[in-house]
Image (cartoon, grey):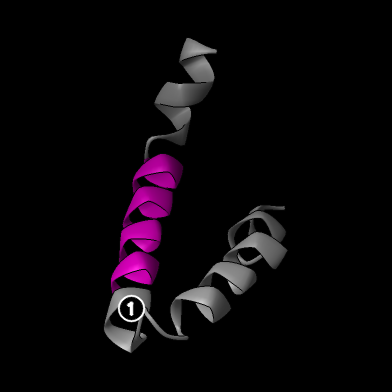
Amino acid sequence: MATPLLAGPGAISTVIILSNPPYGPLQALFVIALNMLVAWITLRQSDLIQRAG
């Protein structure tokens, strides 16, 4: 269930937009890495988040 939310149309369009000028591949890779980190932290702490909700 998490896969479509992590790699959905919003994420794909963000990568496409960031890969074109005035941005470049470095900024796109940074944003992808930052998104991966946030997703990993969120999924890693899902038990705590579920108990809090």
Q: Disc 1 marks which amino acid?
A: Leu
Give the left or right position of residue 39, taking residue 10 as reference: left
Q: Is residue 20 magenta?
A: no
Task: Determine whether the residue tagged by mark 1 lies in a helix, strand or loop.
Answer: helix
Give the left or right position of residue 39, taking residue 7 as reference: left
Q: List x then y, in percent, for residue 47.
A: 46, 29
| Farthest residue, direction top | 52
- Quarter assignment of residue 4: bottom right
Residue toward you, 38 or 29: 29
Q: List x then y, in percent, for residue 24.
A: 35, 85
Which residue is drawn at the image coordinates 71% and 66% (left, top)? 9
Residue toward you, 44 or 6: 6
Residue toward you, 44 or 20: 20
Mark 1 Cα within 10 Å, few/some/many (few <14, many 20+)? some
- Quarter assignment of residue 42: top left
Q: List x then y, in percent, for residue 51.
A: 49, 15
The quarter of the image holding the C terminus is top right
Residue 44's place in the image compared with 28, above or below, is above
Which residue is drawn at the image coordinates 45% and 75% (left, top)? 18
**Residues in magenta, as a range:** 30-44
Magenta stretch, main secondary structure, is helix
Name the residue that disc number 1 marks: 29
